[in-house]
Amino acid sequence: MILVKLGGSVITDKSKKHVFKEGTMKRLAKEIKNSDEKVIVVHGAGSFGHILAKRYRLDKGFMNNKQISGVARVQSDVKNLNLMVVNSLIDEGIHAVSIPPSVVVECRNKKIEKINIDVFKKYLNLGLTPVTFGDVALDRKIGFCIVSGDLFMLELARVFKPKKAVFVSDVDGVYMDKKRMDKIDEKIFRNMKRKKTKIPDVTGSMYEKVKIGLKMSKFTKTIVINGNVNNRLGDALKGRNVVGTVIE
Amino acid sequence: MILVKLGGSVITDKSKKHVFKEGTMKRLAKEIKNSDEKVIVVHGAGSFGHILAKRYRLDKGFMNNKQISGVARVQSDVKNLNLMVVNSLIDEGIHAVSIPPSVVVECRNKKIEKINIDVFKKYLNLGLTPVTFGDVALDRKIGFCIVSGDLFMLELARVFKPKKAVFVSDVDGVYMDKKRMDKIDEKIFRNMKRKKTKIPDVTGSMYEKVKIGLKMSKFTKTIVINGNVNNRLGDALKGRNVVGTVIE
């Protein structure tokens, strides 16, 4: 089994609210369809989640009643994106099934405490392809919290110990001082500087992704690739060497 | 708390695939918004579910691999309807949150065995309005099955013991020999004849609804009303007497 994370920056225009990149998604769906391995798909929320989540400060947990309307709206918006992703996959012949974190995850103080993993396993066994995503989830301590797609990748890697985990981003890999790294390990990571970005992203930048990738390396081989280049994902799923950054 | 079931025949055109009655839904959302009581909304799948579910014979459980594509398509179609219902509610200021049976219910041989009720309670406590629906769910024995919105009403009534349960249909109540009944009890029910209908409905006709309503009467007062008439739902939610059939 292979875990595939479709970054919010690849399947949406992160700078504009609610812009789904339908053509890119269709191509990525075709590349996934050609995989011989079973796949679990995780996707980011992109501009369907981050902009409103930031406005309502949903990453802080419950502070006031005004946020509750934000919880409803952000959950509905990311479900809208998720439905478009699932339908793109179905259109290419993948039997995709949506598994929303809002009802299968429980957090405690922003950390995932419980996931209903059973539901992933059962749909996989039936021959379906689970699709999950960055979402607003319940939190025992602070009411609700943001669960990023990246965080979900780590939890799924821990449980499923997949052959490989592929982060599909909008760049050729992880860069340090304008140079793409073939490989990143703990030592190199300590030298990375957290870069601030102007695009609203409540779940962290590439720095956070590498941090999660390093945690994942205990369970699987993790690679960051560019989903905007034809067949990068397809080749990675077929076990071919591709331009990207291996995190180990 | 009041349970409201929006029938598939009210919010969709059951004879045509994927026709959402947006105007009706908007009016019903306004009527729900005016309720002083907390509400849980359950809706039918209507033409978004029944037509394909019947074609793939999903009500029979797993028989062959061709059905798996049907599971994916029907789940995606009913999620599409659900998203429109949720957005209609949000547009009227209700903080609606979708809770899909496909991931919170487990059946055994078509009977609901387990529901993650916790997630309903937690969203209610946060001030959100849970919205669930007729869906394809996992089944321990036969792989998957159909969970009707009506069946969900019974389970929610059992757990929440609501003040009232309102079935919003497209007729003025339950009819026997062309006469609307003000009230139906066990004795009257035994005289009802199951009527066959030409509209595909994999979850049963009004007969089944009455059967479920009678089971529900142990936990709550159940009423069947016409959602196509202005303010019938609104009045029922406010505790006023309305045209309809009480099941007890």
Image (cartoon, coloured by chain):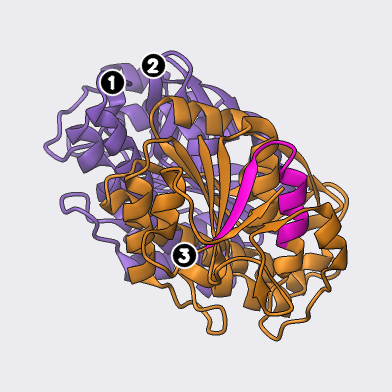
Chain colours: A purple, B orange
Which residue type does callout 2 highlight?
A: Ile
For residue B75, above or below residue B96: below
* Residue designated by label 1: A60
Q: Which element carries disc 1, helix, strand or loop?
A: helix
Dot 2, crowdedness within 10 Å: few (<14), some or many (≥20)? Answer: some
Q: What whole-number distance in Å separates the C-alpha atoms at marks 1 and 3?
A: 40 Å
C-beta proximity under 8 Å, tags 3 and 2: no
Left or right placement of residue B194 versus residue B36 in this view: right
C-beta proximity under 8 Å, tags 1 and 2: yes
Instruction: State which quadrant residue B22 falls in.
Output: bottom left
Q: Which residues are magenta?
A: B209-225
Q: What whole-number distance in Å separates the C-alpha atoms at marks 3 and 2?
A: 39 Å
Indicate which disc residue A229 carries: none
- Residue A215 x %, y %: 49, 23
- Residue B122 x %, y %: 50, 26
Q: Is residue B35 magenta?
A: no
* Residue designated by label 2: A142
Q: Residue drawn at (67%, 70%), measured in percent from left and top?
A: B69
